Amino acid sequence: MYSLTTRQKRALETRDKLLKTSLNLFNKYGYEHVSVEQITKACHVSKGTFYTHFPSKYDVILEKFKELDSFYSTVEKSIDRSLPATEKILLLYKEQMLYLTNIVGKDLLRTVYTAAMTNQVEKEHYLISPHRKIFQILNTYIEEGIELGEFRQDLQATHMQKIIQRCMRANVYDWLIHNEDFDLVTEMAHFTAVVLNGMTMEASSSSYEVN
């Protein structure tokens, strides 16, 4: 069995320390107010060491969110394939909201949303990247729903995906600015169910054309 060398173990420990320290500083002072120099000083390493592990501050946040995509792959496998597309989407979002509430937490998500709205993130933000696993899963469910006649035919799959994505971001943002009385899982389920209902064939007879 392959085992890590002492040097490799130290490198992983340093990377983990940089990751945790960066996130703690972002939470305490705000993403835009923390420099790479502050992070490296807190970890007692050089800037070169930081850039060996992370190309930028933004990549520290990306690393945490990539853990989410591994989680989504697990959730996808647990969802009954015979369920209607709308139910699959609701189950996927339910598991996502539980994970964000219980594992990720408000502090990190505030940091992510703040970073998304600053000029320090020049490239396409990971939150809206079409390559994210959760959006690929959503695409699959939407296409299944269209093929099986569950969804309206006057809506394009890409447009539907954008609308459903906004359900997630809108509810998460609302959760971040509310006190503890906002139940993210429950609110997400209600909001998304209403939106999905408007996309079904049953709603098409009374709908207006969406451009």
Image (tube, helix red, strand yellow):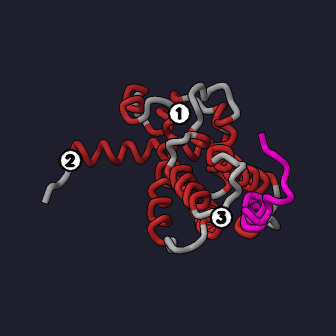
Side of 204 where 72 appears, left or right: left
In the rendered image of this protein, does residue 128 appear above or below residue 152? above
**Label 1: which secondary element:** helix
Q: Which residue is mark 1?
A: 57
Q: Earlier in the sequence, mark 1 or mark 3?
A: 1
Q: Which residue is mark 3?
A: 150
Point out the image quarter for the C terminus: top right
Callout 2: few (<14), some (14-19), or many (20+) C-alpha neighbours within 10 Å?
Answer: few
Answer whether residue 193 is magenta in the image. Answer: yes
Specify whether residue 111 is in view. no
In the image, what residue type sits under mark 2?
Thr
Give x and y (percent) for residue 94: 64, 67
Residue mark closest to the camera, 1 vs 2:
1
The correct choice, above or below, for 72 with respect to 158 in the image is: below
Q: Earlier in the sequence, mark 2 or mark 3?
A: 2
Amino acid type at circle 3 is Glu
Question: As displayed, is residue 181 above or below residue 136?
Answer: below
Do the residues under discs 1 and 2 have CB atoms within 8 angstroms? Answer: no
Mark 1, residues whose alpha carbon is within 10 Å: few (<14), some, or many (≥20)? many
Could you tell which of marks 1 and 2 lies nearer the N-terminus? 2
> What distance separates the C-alpha of mark 2 from that of mark 3?
56 Å
Q: Which residue is mark 2?
A: 6
- 89 or 6, which lies in front? 89
| Residue at image location 26% in from the left, 48% down from the top | 9
| Part of the protein shown in magenta | 188-211
